[in-house]
């Protein structure tokens, strides 16, 4: 087993643990670390694209267990899932295709700024409040497209945007989180397919199909699922406010790593 494979396994285990601990997808962790792990073997011009595309492909597999767990508890609001999914699929795919034409530096800075925003939200405990007005289907469609587009461009399952949007639409937080977890699957599927198509001429460069590295995908996905339940148990033993503030500092550190790359 190579040193790189071991590092992929460790990354998967850590991202899976954190996903269980805080209920967030692993993309915010996987992308910055992959940026460094893949750097020696992949040209810089497509390095960020490959890190994001691979992270999305990993989320396809990790979202299965999350979706199943929430479905067992009856927490997913499938009617809202159906409202968001069509344009989320379009947004995620088009986000991946758009990324093909964006430079390494643009994607790098865009990701870092997004990660800093998430860190600030966690640090200050910013959250949406319920809104009494019912949103039109056009608002749902537009929101789905934007969520899918941005999620694909930064390699995440979209929970950081989907959950606040659903809560703002007067949906209970536990249902919003569960529905966001379900929405993460179509985001990851459409986004990863988009990155495969967008980078179809780069197969020899990336070690997979398009902008998806197979070794990283298989090892990270396989090692990220088992630690998730442990993370979920640990979250009940630690003060949640301190945990979120500590993790917000970690996210800011990862953002700095990306900016300074």
Image: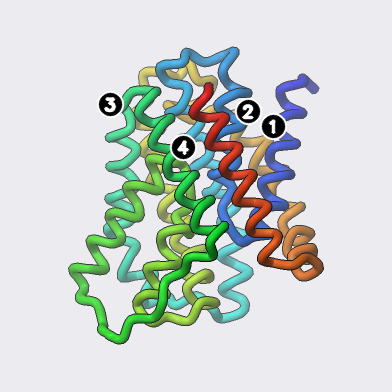
Circle 4 residues within 10 Å: few <14, some 14–19, many ≥20: many
The numbered disc on residue 215 is 2
Distance, label 4 to label 2, CA atoms, is 25 Å
**Residue 112 shows which numbered tag?**
4
When the figure is inspected, residue 116 is found, relative to residue 259, above or below; the finding is below
User: Which label is found at residue 101?
Assistant: 3
| Cα distance in 3D space between marks 2 and 3 | 25 Å
Q: Which mark is residue 199?
A: none
Are the residues at dot 2 and dot 1 in contact (C-beta closer than 8 Å)? yes
Of mark 3 and mark 4, the one earlier in the sequence is 3
**Dot placed on the residue nearer the N-terminal end, 2 or 1:** 1
Upstream in sequence: badge 2 or badge 3: 3
Residue 116, how many percent across, how many down? 49, 45
Element type at marker 1?
A: helix
According to the image, label 1 marks what residue?
8
Q: Nearer the N terminus, badge 4 or badge 1? A: 1
- The quarter holding residue 141 reads bottom left
| Residue 137 located left or right of residue 174 | left
- Crowd around label 1: few <14 · some 14–19 · many ≥20 (10 Å): many
- Residue at the image point whose x is 52% and y is 24% from the top: 260
Q: How far apart, in angstroms, are the residues tagged by discs 3 and 1? A: 28 Å
- Residue under the image location 59 percent in, 13 percent down: 40
């Amino acid at each position: 087993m190579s040193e790189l494979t071991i590092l992929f396994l460790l990354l998967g285990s850590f991202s899976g643990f954190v996903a269980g601990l805080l209920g967030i997808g692993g993309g915010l962790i996987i992308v910055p670390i992959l940026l460094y792990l893949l750097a020696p073997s992949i040209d810089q011009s497509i390095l960020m694209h490959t890190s994001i595309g691979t992270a999305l492909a990993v989320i396809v597999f990790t979202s299965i267990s999350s979706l199943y767990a929430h479905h067992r508890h009856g927490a997913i609001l499938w009617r809202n899932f159906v409202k968001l999914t069509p344009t989320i699929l379009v947004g995620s795919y088009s986000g991946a295709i758009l990324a093909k034409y964006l430079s390494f530096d643009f994607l790098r800075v865009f990701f870092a700024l997004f990660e800093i925003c998430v860190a600030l939200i966690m640090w200050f405990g910013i959250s949406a409040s319920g809104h009494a007005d019912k949103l039109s289907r056009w608002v749902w469609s537009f929101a789905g497209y934007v969520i899918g587009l941005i999620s694909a461009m930064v390699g995440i399952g979209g929970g950081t945007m989907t959950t606040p949007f659903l809560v703002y639409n007067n949906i209970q937080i536990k249902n919003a989180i569960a529905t966001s977890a379900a929405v993460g699957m179509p985001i990851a599927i459409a986004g990863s397919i988009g990155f495969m198509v967008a980078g179809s001429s780069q197969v020899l460069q990336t070690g997979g199909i398009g902008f998806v590295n197979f070794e990283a995908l298989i090892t990270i996905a396989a090692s990220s699922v088992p630690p998730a339940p442990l993370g979920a148990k640990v979250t009940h033993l630690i003060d949640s406010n301190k945990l979120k503030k500590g993790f917000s500092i970690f996210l800011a550190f990862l953002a700095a790593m990306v900016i300074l790359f």
